[in-house]
Image (spheres, rainbow, N blue to C red):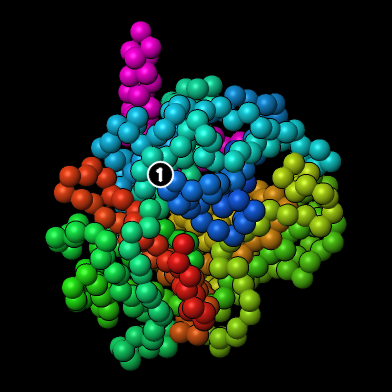
Amino acid sequence: MSRSLLLLLFFIVSGTCFAQRLPDHIYIPDIHSVKLFRENNQQSPALLILGSSDQLELHFDDLGGSPKNYYYTIQLCNADWTPADVNVFDYIKGFIQNRLNQYRVSTIAATKYVHYQALLPERNCMPAKSGNYLLKVFLDADTSKLAFTKRMMVIENKVSIAARVQQPFDPELLYSHQKIQFSVNTQQLNILSPQQVTVVILQNNRWDNATTGIQPSFIRGSVMEYNGEQDCLFPAGKEYRWADLQSFRFESDRIERIERTTQPINIYIKPDPERGRLRYAYYKDRNGWEEIGTTEYINPWWQSDYANVQFTFTPANNQPYAGKSIYLLGELTGNQVGETSKMVYDAQKGVYTRSLLLKQGYYSYIYVTKDDKNETAKADPVTTEGSYWETENEYTILFYYHSFSGRHDELIGITTINSRNLGSNY
């Protein structure tokens, strides 16, 4: 009887995973401020070492008013985030569903919400294999009532990666792009073909412009060298813009005005001009990360307030970009190019605007453009921000391996490098 129930749960979870598997997507409008990061470090990817005691912090708010029964599960995926053809009982040790028991109703804040948090993985729900995982949070133990999804990764270090950032040799890209050169030592593995491996390179934790499908330029024994002139190129962009919203009473340098007659209050960020023609100037930024925090209260997770924050972008000569759309990009929009991050052109004022409901904290962001007629084109910061080789960016290299007897892409190597500093392995 118990085995039949377990099999029934498996088919329910598997069916939902295939039907709704968009990564980093919110399905319930009342859900806000979803964050998943390494414990005590908000500016870090959701990454675990297989078999270690590492934990991730999960935080999110429900503005629906009253506490609800939220549950979660994890779905093993391949390198391209498609569901892996692996039985759920083979990659989860313990229960395939767990309830989120830790929550607290907001205090002090004028906007009422319920804050949920958890430390993952729990001992009764541990990932048993390395690879990409999709964290799924849903209501009432019913996987069809999906609330949101978040990416997380589990690594089993089996290779070493050495990498550095270079200027391209192409004179047209020499001063505007950055090239990643790296090598992977696969001595511990028996890799018979480069087709067994998948490499993914992320710039500032962005999946929208990730580079994948790269083949090694040379193979020397157990070392794969990746040095293609066109394979690992990224527009360097410029340092990220910022908005300090840690206090709603003290107006920081980027706030133009605050309207307190509404609830939530309205905050207007100073208009952001086009920077494509401005020379590069270095300043320390956060590469798109956000940090929930407040300068006024003790615990930002359930004491911070919300505000409708309006961002304004001023194009050159106040004219819209023909055939292109502008998007607001950063962790505040999930680093996604879509309707939730698309700027709207105001013909009367000659500016693009976008309003977001944001919690108190510090936010970094950029503006990018995308061709309306080319859906496969990547978002480009060159027109709105400019692009200079000197820009400080962070690059993450992910190395996946698919054995001939395996049924999914294992994550066996990762390194993060900075265009201004040396990289560090996980």
Res 17 quadrant in image: top left
Look at the image and tell me whether residue 278 can be seen: yes
Residue lying furthest front? 188
Q: Is residue 10 above or below residue 91?
A: above
Give the crowd class for mark 1: few <14, some 14-19, many >=20 residues within 10 Å.
many
User: Total number of numbered labels?
Assistant: 1
Magenta stretch contains residue 258 = no
Res 171 quadrant in image: bottom left
Q: In this view, does 138 lie above or below 338?
A: above
Residue lying furthest bottom? 171
Query: Where residue 68 appears, x then y in whole percent?
Result: 63, 25
Foreground of the two, 231 or 265: 231
Foreground of the two, 155 or 70: 155
Q: Residue at x 28, y 49 (%)?
A: 409
Q: In this view, does 405 lie to the left or right of 126?
A: left
Q: Which residue is drawn at 36% across and 37% down?
A: 91
Give the residue type at disc 1: Tyr
Look at the image and tell me whether residue 63 can be seen: no
Q: Which residue is drawn at 70% across and 26% down?
A: 66
Q: State the extent of the magenta-drawn residues as a range.
A: 1-30
Image quadrant for the N terminus? top left
Residue lying furthest top? 1
Q: Name the residue under label 1.
A: 133
Q: In this view, does 310 lie above or below 323?
A: above
Secondary structure mostly seen in magenta is helix
Foreground of the two, 330 or 385: 330
Q: What element carries label 1?
A: strand
Q: In this view, does 360 lie to the left or right of 88?
A: right
Query: Where residue 381 appears, x then y in whole percent?
Result: 47, 72
Q: In this view, does 400 lie to the left or right of 345?
A: left
Query: Where residue 370 appears, x then y in whole percent?
Result: 41, 64
